[in-house]
Amino acid sequence: MAIMATMATMATMAELGALSTESSFSAAPTDASSSSNAVSLTSTPPTTVSPDSISLASEPDIPKLDTATTVPLLESAIPLLQIEQHVEVEQPESGQQTPVASAIVVADEPAPVTPEPTARPRRARSSLPVYNISQLSGTSKNRNRRAKGDDRRRTISGDTLLNHGDDNNSAAASTDTLLAKAKDTVQKVTDALNSDWSIAGPSIPKGVKITNKYKAARPPAEITRRATRHSGIVPETTLASSLSALGKRSRKTFEKGLSKGSKVAREILRLQDTNEFAKIDTRPVLTTYWSNGKFVDPNAKEEPAAAASSPPRKKARIEEAVVPGQDKKDGAAEPDKKEPAGPPVKKRRVKKWLEKGLYAGQEAPADINKGLTAQEKKKLASIPELAAGSKPNKTLPLPIFNGMRILINGRDFKLPYDICNPLPPGQPKPAAYRTMTRNRFVGDAAAYWKKTPHFEDFASKCVCKPEDGCAEDCQNRIMLYECDETNCNVGKERCQNRAFQNLQERVKKGGRYRVGVEVVKTSDRGYGVRSNRCFEPNQIIMEYTGEIITEEECERRMNEEYKNNECYYLMSFDQNMIIDATTGSIARFVNHSCSPNCRMIKWIVSGQPRMALFAGDRPIMTGEELTYDYNFDPFSAKNVQKCLCGSANCRGVLGPKPKDKKPPKPLKEDKKSSAVKGSVKAGKRKLKELLSAGSTDRVVDVYDEIDAAGSPKKMRKIKTATGVLKKKMAVTKETKKKPVSSGGLKAAKSAARGAATAIKRSVSNISVNAKSALGSSTKNRRASTTDLLKTYSSGKAKTSPKVKAKAVPTKKVKVSSRSSSLTIVAAGTGAGLGTAAKRTPKRTPKKAAVASASSSASAARKRTPSWKVRAVVADSNTPATGGNSSSSSSTGATKKPASKARSALELSRPANKIRLVTNKED
Ligand SMILES: C[S@@+](CC[C@H](N)C(=O)[O-])C[C@H]1O[C@@H](n2cnc3c(N)ncnc32)[C@H](O)[C@@H]1O
């Protein structure tokens, strides 16, 4: 064994000697297996050893190593490094042998390590500007230091590198120490400089080139860490990063030490010229990003780029559409493709609907009856949407909880505020509030009323055409007669003159909106009525209903039943009748206003007089309080009430309209003649004008009214007067001149008959007023007036002695009172007295009554004139002039067109009744 070892050693030495003569060594691996574990230990002349292929070229000072002891050690150290390096070293020109050690270490089985004798190197060169492993490692020091327990971390620093001379000078460094140092140093350097960096790199002296062979033999670096930025591309070397990983101070020191012309420094300086060292990344920076919620792979960069290069799809489509048949952008025509000649046909876009809504997912519970009461279950069963087998509404499902509640409890349909705004329930209601929707005759009234067939004569139909629809020109309308089957020529479908019927149908259906009114408590005027819907101009709102009573009954009630009442709901009605709405419709709660928005008008409906509240000339909005002008007659000063309507033109008191005030009285003589003449003249003129105007087929009578101040008279359409009227009005003559149609004649005849009958009516208004006034003043006055009125109405001259003396009851003429009876005849008693009463001008009950009657007439006729003819109180000697219906006078001898009634009455005062009134006042 010893001989064999010696021979092997000698052979090795011979080989080394051959290598050294060539001043180079080629440490090419002998076989493939050995090359994998080769390592090059450059710049480590003192310790470079190799068991089989090591060359200590040109190193005369290198001590002769005991290869038997050093090689195994090195072999044991090298496999750990797993590095292979093939270095070709150029011989320096100076001929000086550079101590370069290069070793290819084969990771063979390590030989047993035997302790080596410490041998002092023959020569130690401290100034050798090479990389000294022993100096770098400081093995002995470290070992000693760590053995002493100093575990401080030591890094390769400038100090370590520069103070290598101490170790070199140490002659006591043994081979094993050197080997250990080499191993340790290699390890440390490799660790510090990253395993990717080959130690051969820095130690390669100038002129050394890394061959391709080496590169090919180098195994690919294993990717252990991958930065996103690098995208998997491993850098060739990490020297720069390794250096940068050093501390600032250490790096400075390191660089300082390297900059002293050493090979390492040169190498590093050379490396510094590289982009990598300067941290210049020449590779394209590939970034990853997310687009439209998708990860964009940088490796698939070609596709998006290609896509980006092509124009957007939409744009391309538009281009095609705009320039059909033209070449593409690249100029390549497509001959095969035939473009449509016409404009491009737009594809119809199909709208896509969301299938799910806000409450999607809230499917109905499996058992919808769960937790419900029996009643609720019953209700649910009746809801078709929840019935078994019904298709669930998936598009707009009801929210489960609210929807179920709504389905079970239900909810009324509500109109917007502007359309309907009913008060919340619980509003104060008047005590003893009893309603009556239809008039009811009480006591003698019914019997008396039946006796009066004064509407039978008006059975003839109107002459309206179907297209006219019984509008403003309808005779029935003009006369305040409502059309029905018997008197309408148009028919129900087209007739517009059926307000009461419409009202009845409307209210019959029920509902607050249809009724449209409600009682409200006002702040200062007791209860009132307001609308909770809109009304058109002149639209019927509600009927004023109550008990129809006679004057006697009215008097009795006022003195007995209502004597302690604060308010009376009595209104003059028709035929000396009073309508008592104490038990009646809620129209009785409608308050007075000097600027009202409604009117109270009496109509004849199916032969019966009926009173209703109509909207005025302007529409009524929801929430407005409904008012009309009372033309209130307080009967006496003590009943005068202060008006609280608050309108700009408030009269201050609940009294008649100002225009009804009497004009200054002319002298007696002049007054009589001029008034009569004037009124007759005016009547004739009007009639003439009317007749000459054209429409002769229906102009048969004249009605107009004149206010107390002698304001311009209103023209009224008339019917041909026959009988008494024909004689007295001299209308016939005029009428004959004009061609009159058969329809018009018929209507005229009917009107004339009706007028004659209507004349027989008495005025309840004035009766009540007078009666009440009398009742409040003197017994005699009341009795006499009542008697007089009764006389007028019944044809018996039952007047008081005083009246009898002056009144000349000749022929009985009943006066139509339809339009003149709209005066409140009794109202509140206590309210508004005091100051209001003091401010009230002196007005006698009688005067007030007259004024209120006439003003009511004008108010009622403002919209549609009445055909009524007024009777004139006739003097025994003088032909009667026009008489106001409210005068209740009758002569029978002469009649005057009603248009002059009041004027004649007030201005001429020929009748005994006027005198009677005057006397009473006096
Ligand atoms: C037919 S009642 C109207 C309903 C009455 N507000 C009620 O609470 O029963 C008429 C009475 O109402 C009162 N009234 C009506 N309009 C008024 C007004 N403009 N100013 C003052 N009081 C008024 C008067 O007391 C009058 O006598």
Image: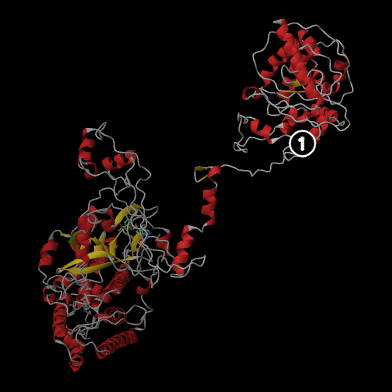
Q: Is residue 662 above or below residue 155?
A: below
> Of 491 and 668, which appears nearest the observer?
491
Q: Is residue 890 above or below residue 165?
A: below
Residue 567 in view: no
Quadrant of ligand 1: it is bottom left
Q: Residue at x 55, y 51 (%)?
A: 305
Q: Is residue 692 above or below residue 170?
A: below
Q: Is residue 262 left or right of residue 284?
A: right
> Of 52 and 192, which appears nearest the observer?
52
In the image, residue 717 lies at what x, y percent?
24, 82
Q: Residue at x 89, y 20 (%)?
A: 126
Q: Is residue 868 above or below residue 157?
A: below
In the image, residue 87 lies at what x, y percent?
74, 29
In the image, residue 752 lies at what x, y percent?
16, 81
In the image, residue 138 lies at what x, y percent?
80, 16
Q: Quadrant of residue 175?
A: top right
Q: Give the quarter of the figure containing the N terminus.
A: top right
